[in-house]
Image: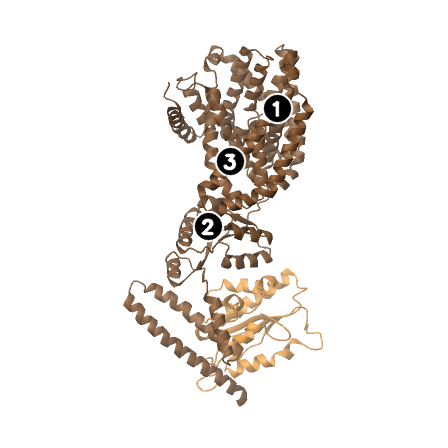
Chain colours: A brown, B orange
Amino acid sequence: MESGGLFYILVFLVSALICVPICKRLGLGSVLGYLLAGMIIGPYGLKVIAGVEDIMHISEFGVVLLMFLIGLELEPKKLWDMRVSIFGLGGLQVLSVSVVIGLIVKLFFAQSTAVSILVGMAFALSSTAIGLQILSEKKLLATTSGSSAFSILLFQDIAVIPMIAILPLLTVNAAASASTGNPWASVLEVVMVLATVIVLGRLLLRHFLRWIGALHLREIFTAFALFLVIGMSFLMQRLGISMALGAFMAGVLLADSEYRHALETDIEPFKGLLMGLFFISVGMSVNLIQILENPAQFVLLVLLVFIVKTAVHAGLAFLFKTPRAQIPFFAIILSQIGEFAFVLLGAAQGLKVLDTNTVGTLTAVVALSMLFTPLTILLYDKVYLRYVAGASTMEEDKIEDEHSPVIIAGFGRFGQIIGRLLYANRVKATVLDHEPSQIEMLRRFGFKVHYGDATRMDLLEAAGAQHAKILVVAIDDMDDCLKLIDSAREAFPHLKIFARARNVDHVYRLMDRDVFNFERELYESSLRMGSSVLRALGWPAYQSVIAANIFRDHNNQMLEELHRRRDNPDEMVSRSKQARDDLEKMFQQENHYLERTEAWSNEQ
Amino acid sequence: MKKALVLFAHPFSKQSRVNRAIMDQLRELKHVHVHDLYEEYPYFHIQVQKEQELLLEHDLVVWQHPFYWFSMPPLMKLWCDEVLRRGFAYGPGGNKLQGKDFFLSITTGGWGDPSSPGSVEDFFPPYRQTIEQCGMKWHKPVVMTGTGKATEEQILLHAEAVRRRMIDYCATGVCKDM
């Protein structure tokens, strides 16, 4: 097939479009769908596509973007809070699984010590891509088991670096080990680059993002987001650190920035597709021929890996006091072997620690174990949860929900006053605004403001619309305001909407939508000014306020009435005229009464 | 069936155990309309006409409020000043409230127990004057003293007694003492 890139893309998309929906419908999860698509089009299936490795390289970016998004979710403070579980739990997991598997390889498969250590290390790793995909699809990242699993995956990503570093030590070939220069120099280099990145990121990144945001060019903002992730990964790769880790760091750097939601929504679609590509390439790398020659052997190997890892993980979960109901899920979600195993095995083959045949077998085991995960999750859902554990107990034990009850869209003159009132009363509000200069100023005053176009539903969702109670719409543009209300009503019907109306026409259009919690932007302040004018003309202060109040009531009532007659302009005009007379009469009565009241006290 | 209107005035009603208990008891009743003034007019702008219409629709008027500085909370007083107008409640043509029944239901926070020298009744004359000026019939007030120390049970008993008095009135048209 020499048709080139376009043809490849077409094949990928078609296979995914066929397999993924089918698997999803069957309740098998999207991951399995991609894996199957890969197996079908791969060199051992229909042979439509060759050159798995190249595709694998591109698709690794899916994992990279995933890690970036995860990083965005984690503020440095949260990460620091997780340090015990990352290093404690993660370290123990890598160590114990490596040792157990290493011993098994050494004792039962009679391999050399070097091979045993290598296989132990490679098989200790779990698939970040699969694990996180399943956790986020099932919305379990916030549970104890979910965050433990995440800690382990994060630690594994870090642990890959020393693993690759000690590979040369395992080789018997002295010449190969000599090629790795002074280890201290490279460590120093890594530390220095990381420090520079963090400092520069803190100092410059936000300003630059603001500058880019001020251009109001969405695609340029997206381009910059992508540049950031890819640039960071590139840098990390040059340093010999995992790309995913680099992207993760970039994410963490931006986690507490107001651009978080905008970045998230921009990167998300790329992530999804590239992750799909990644799973497809894993599927393609499954050597079906080798497996079919001796299927029993492979099934047994995969089962062995699963049993060992599940057992060790269950023990660790027990040790770290994970709620009992969550242990089984925690144990199985990490029991496949991860994508980094491919990297380690490849490197080991290059260093001649392993021969080609063994690498082929091990690679097949890794790929099969990944293929196996969605199936175990399915078994867990359909069999364990239903027949063993009874009702689902996974819902409990959520990490504290910190979403705000109020979302304020538009933080200009109007929204700000609302926000400040709420803030002063310790009511949490999430603010969305698309004016970067505004945002920066507000942040200095301690507001939590997010950059973005509030009329986009994905952004509203990212701001926590499903947890919020009230949406305050205070954006300037009338059409945007109505558009936002319409789509928010549809996407989040539970949200109570409060809207700022620019003028009477806007009010009518809000009433058309059954929005009655509105405020005309200049109305209340104009009334106040009106009563001040009366007061300046010599009226008693209180009487001038009463006059404004009466006017207000009457006007509000008229508004509703005229809205009902809006389709009949003649009637509307005559009713308005009549209303003006009514009001005048009302004031006459009221003023008459006020005069009489004074007389009343004299009479007594 | 007679109809009763309860004018409830408490600026922080969520904090008042007793008033809340009474209101909860009364809100379920079919012939009793509970009108929460502080919920209705948080900006102290009373709609006079609406209030007067409400009064006209009912046979019994009850004021339910905590005792503030030996008198009523400010919005209740404003309600009196605004709604009980000349030509409506008194003066020429001011006979609209003639013959309606009235009783006062107040709560006091520990102060004014019957055993103490100055008793709560000492402060009722202005209330009584107002009501009789409007031509309404004054009935024995309902008082719950020492609300700060009251047990949940005492509060419920009191609320239940108020409720009974209202039900009896609506059924018989006679305002019995409790």
- Residue B178 in view in this figure: no
Q: Nearer the viewer, residue A305 or A133?
A: A133
Q: Chain of mark 3?
A: A
- Residue A205 position (above or below residue A273): below
User: Mark 2 — on which chain does it sit?
Assistant: A
Q: Quarter-wise, where is residue A183 in the image?
A: top right
Callout 2 crowding tier (Cα within 10 Å): few <14, some 14–19, many ≥20:
some
Chain containing the residue with disc 1: A
- The circle drawn on residue A311 is 1
- Amino acid type at circle 1 is Ala
* Residue at 65 percent of width and 38 percent of height: A80
Residue A572 in view (yes/no): yes
Q: Are marks 3 and 1 on the same chain?
A: yes
Q: Which residue is mark 2?
A: A494
Against A228, is B117 above or below? Answer: below
Among the two numbered marks 3 and 2 on one chain, the one whose residue lies closer to the N terminus: 3
How many residues crowd around disc 1 within 10 Å: few (fewer than 14), some, or many (20 or more)?
A: some
Q: Answer with mark 3 or mark 1, whichever residue precedes in sequence.
A: 3
Q: Quadrant of the C terminus of chain B?
A: bottom right
Q: Amino acid at mark 2?
A: His
Q: Nearer the viewer, mark 2 or mark 1?
A: 2
Taking B50 as reference, is A349 above or below it?
above
Label 1: state its secondary structure.
helix
Indicate the position of residue A283 as horizontal and vertical percent values. Answer: 46, 22
> Considering only order in the chain, which callout, 1 or 2, is on the residue closer to the N terminus?
1
Which residue is disc 3 drawn over? A227
